[in-house]
Image (spheres, rainbow, N blue to C red):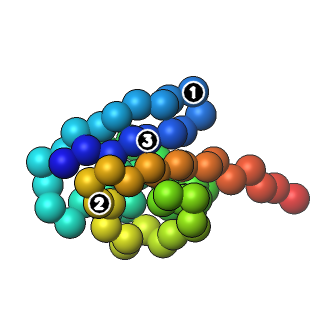
Amino acid sequence: MSFNLKYKNIDEKREIDEENYTINDLLKDLGLSAQTTVAKINGDLTVEDTVINDGDEVQLIQIIYGG
């Protein structure tokens, strides 16, 4: 299975062998936190437990916040 990943300057096709690979799994693999990263699949905002399907485009957006 493969999907397209877009994050900062990354724009690549990623191959995975796992079934039920989620946004949370991807964040862990990249060393990112769900607290500071928003995910979109095929242009739609999604939650961390959403499963990534073959051919999906996943875009990760780093959230900047402060006080």
Quarter of the figure that contains the C terminus: bottom right
Between marks 3 and 1, how big is the CA–CA gap?
10 Å
Q: Residues within 10 Å of mark 3 (few under 14, many from 20)?
A: some
Where in the figure is residue 20, as x and y percent of width and height?
20, 66
Secondary structure, mark 1, is: loop
Q: Are marks 3 and 1 in contact (CB under 8 Å)?
A: no
Residue 33 lies left or right of residue 21; in this view the side is: right
Residue with the mark numbered 3: 5
The label on residue 9 is 1
Where in the figure is residue 42, as x and y percent of width and height?
50, 58
Residue 4 lies left or right of residue 53; in this view the side is: right
Front residue of 36 and 38: 38
Where in the figure is residue 27, as x and y percent of width and height?
40, 52
Q: Residue at x 51, y 69 (%)?
A: 46
Q: Amino acid at mark 1?
A: Asn
Q: Residue at x 19, y 48 (%)?
A: 1
Residue 10 lies left or right of residue 65; in this view the side is: left
